[in-house]
Image (cartoon, grey):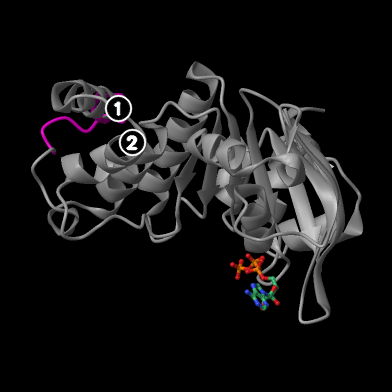
Amino acid sequence: MIEVKDLYKEFNGIPVLKGVSTTFEKGKTNMIIGQSGSGKTVFLKCLLGLHIPEKGIISFDGRKHTELDIKERRQLRQEIGMVFQGGALYDSLTVEENIMFPLKMFTDNSYSEMLERVNFVLDRVNLENANKKFPSEISGGMQKRVSIARAIVMNPKYLFCDEPNSGLDPNTATVIDNLIQEITKEYQMITVINSHDMNSVMEIGEKIIFLKNGVKAWEGSNKEIFKTENESIVDFVYSSNLFKKVKEAYLNETK
Ligand SMILES: Nc1ncnc2c1ncn2[C@@H]1O[C@H](COP(=O)(O)OP(=O)(O)OP(=O)(O)O)[C@@H](O)[C@H]1O
């Protein structure tokens, strides 16, 4: 379990996260949502160890960030897979080389062992025969699959995704969402996803943390989101007319 307690982060005296607490469990797709500037990326960067919070505790299965030495931090970092916004693939490397990169960096495996692992994860994200292609030669959806394959190649315990659907059409976005949820369950990872996309939230948001101005304004599941009367989340979700209609249909169905 990842436990976050009273997380506080500021920049130049301006608070961005103001005492956020929550927990993330194994095998669940957890989502951080909120308006632009609400602190989602800063929150994820604190989890990754890229920002050092002024206050608060982040604990990975009992290991508190602040109490780890350099070796333990390095170990923890290797247990985290990251899908960056936009994919962040190396343009000059092939798909195979991109995915092999963490293995080369962090393991002593032989080339054939690494290749076997690369092919395994490529197969898992349904991307066979793409090994020798460059990122520019494949579609945006395929690039996201490569990015997910690279994130899971080290068999991580924790998977963090920053806006994994940005730039994808709705169908491809749903396929990527479902893939992330499937692998989360299959490998029993703790997955935390930053998202703007309400479709994704409704599709795979098993636990949703709604940040508003750096404060956790609501927490619940995609099923509860339709029933809550919390004004902040209602305003956020139903700023889209489509979701007003979906809610009415859902409530009618479950009467
Ligand atoms: N390195 C930094 N230095 C100073 N201010 C920062 C830094 N990083 C983020 N901020 C500020 O923190 C606030 C929250 O930013 P953050 O990127 O977390 O928002 P967000 O919710 O992820 O937004 P978006 O959905 O647009 O990506 C913003 O006001 C931003 O300007």
Q: Nearer the viewer, residue 144 or 205?
A: 144
- Mark 2 surroundings within 10 Å by alpha-carbon count, few (fewer than 14), some (14 through 19), many (20 or more): many
Name the residue that disc number 2 marks. Answer: 149
Helix, strand or loop status at disc 1: helix
Q: Please identify the quarter of the rendering in which residue 52 is found.
A: bottom right
Quadrant in which the C terminus is drawn: top right
Q: Pointer 2 and pointer 1: residues touching (CB < 8 Å)?
A: yes
Helix, strand or loop status at disc 2: helix
One can see residue 218 in this view: no
Counting every numbered tag in the picture gives 2
> Of the residues shown, which amino acid type is indicated by label 1?
Val
236 is within the stretch colored magenta: no
> Of the residues shown, which amino acid type is indicated by label 2?
Ala
Q: Which residues are magenta?
A: 122-130
- Mark 1 surroundings within 10 Å by alpha-carbon count, few (fewer than 14), some (14 through 19), many (20 or more): many
Q: Position of residue 60 (x, y in %)?
A: 70, 33
Answer with left or right where residue 195 lies relative to residue 110.
Answer: right
How much space separates mark 2 and mark 1, taking CA atoms?
A: 5 Å
Name the residue that disc number 1 marks. Answer: 121
The first of marks 2 and 1 along the sequence is: 1
In this view, 205 is above or below 44: above
